[in-house]
Every structure is written in C-alpha cells, then in structure tokens.
C-alpha cells in the first residue's frame, strides 16, 4: 500500500479549538494491551479529563470503561473519533461517523492518512486531523 500525504488537515489553531470543545472521545482500535500506543494514548486522554469510549472487537472493559464493538453501538454523544486502524478502514469509520450525525471531529493517528475519507468527513461538516497523535498534540498545546 502506498503512503498518502495528508491534503486535508486542521492547523494548530483549529486543533487547539478541537481540544477545547471536546469532552468525549471514541478510541477506534483501543487495545487492552498497556504497551500498545492506542492504550497509552487513551490512558493519557482519560487522565487529561476526557471521557474515553473504547471501540474494540473483544473485551468488556478497557481502562475501566465499557467497550463497544462499533461506533454505532455507542449510546451517547461522541465529540471526537480517534482512529488507530489501518488507512483502508478509515473510510468505513468515516461512513459510521456520517451516519451517526453527532461527530464533530475525525482524527487519525500518526502514519494514518486517507484523503478521500477525510474529504468526505469535511464535506459532512466534521473537522479532520490526519497523521497526528492526540497525546502529543494535547501535550504540546497544553
């Protein structure tokens, strides 16, 4: 698979605003393994005061939070979707975000870019951040 350069992305000012307006973050691909990046980032965000919602195909609980199998299973408002899945899965996650209609931001982690999905999310009114780590950016801007 060929790596993409992000052509759709928020700038530092927009990222600061995203964090200021975000309370609930669904972590797509949140691993129960404490040595995995998704778990470390989710733990950091949780300690920083965000409500995290793990989305993972197995487990009942991660970091003390109920685990959901998909974004569409989450019963409450989700402000941000933080994606730790391969670029070819990002499009289906964005489709779920659009179907929900209550997602403000789609964020893909370091190394994850899908410009076509990002453009679709942006056209649906969502803010988009690609190829950035939520933990690193939050620490940098705090």
Image (cartoon, grey):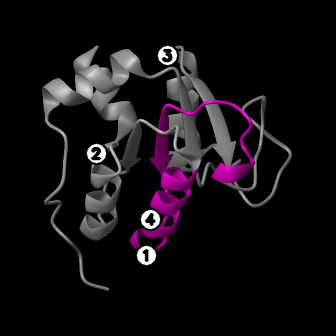
Identify residue for label 2.
129
Which mark is first along the chain, 2 or 3? 3
**Residue 68 location (% of width, % of height):** 75, 47
The residue sitting at 49% across, 70% down in the picture is 89
* Residue at image location 57% in from the left, 33% down from the top: 78
Count of residue discs: 4
Q: Are there few (<14), some (14-19), or many (20+) residues within 10 Å of tag 1?
A: few
Q: Earlier in the sequence, mark 3 or mark 4?
A: 3
According to the picture, the residue beneath numbered tag 3 turns out to be 48
- Number of the front mark, 3 or 4: 4
Q: CA distance from mark 4 to mark 1?
A: 6 Å
Callouts 4 and 1 close, C-beta under 8 Å? yes
Judged left or right of residue 5, residue 39 is right
Using the rendered view, name the quadrant where residue 137 is placed.
top left
Q: CA distance from mark 3 to mark 1?
A: 30 Å
Circle on res. 88 = 1
Quarter of the image containing the C terminus?
A: top left
* Residue 47 in the image, given as x and y percentages of width and height: 56, 17
State the mark number for residue 90.
Answer: 4
Earlier residue among tags 4 and 2 = 4
What SS does tag 1 mark?
helix
Specify the segment rendered in magenta. Answer: 71-99
Mark 2: few, some, or many residues within 10 Å (few <14, many ≥20)?
many
x, y (%) of residue 118? 30, 58
């Amino acid at each position: 698979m060929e790596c993409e350069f992000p052509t759709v992305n928020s700038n530092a000012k927009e990222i600061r605003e995203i964090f200021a307006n975000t309370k609930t973050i669904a972590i797509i691909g949140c691993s129960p393994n404490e040595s995995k990046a998704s778990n470390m980032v989710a733990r950091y965000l949780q300690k920083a005061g965000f409500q995290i919602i793990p989305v993972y195909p197995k487990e009942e609980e991660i970091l003390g939070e109920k685990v959901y199998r998909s974004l569409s299973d989450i019963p409450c408002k989700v402000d941000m979707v933080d994606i730790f899945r391969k670029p070819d899965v990002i499009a289906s996650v964005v489709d779920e975000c659009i179907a929900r209609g209550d997602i403000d931001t789609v964020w893909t982690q370091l190394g994850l870019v899908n410009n076509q999905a990002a453009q679709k999310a942006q056209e649906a009114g969502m803010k988009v951040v690609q190829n950035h780590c939520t933990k690193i950016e939050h620490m940098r801007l705090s």
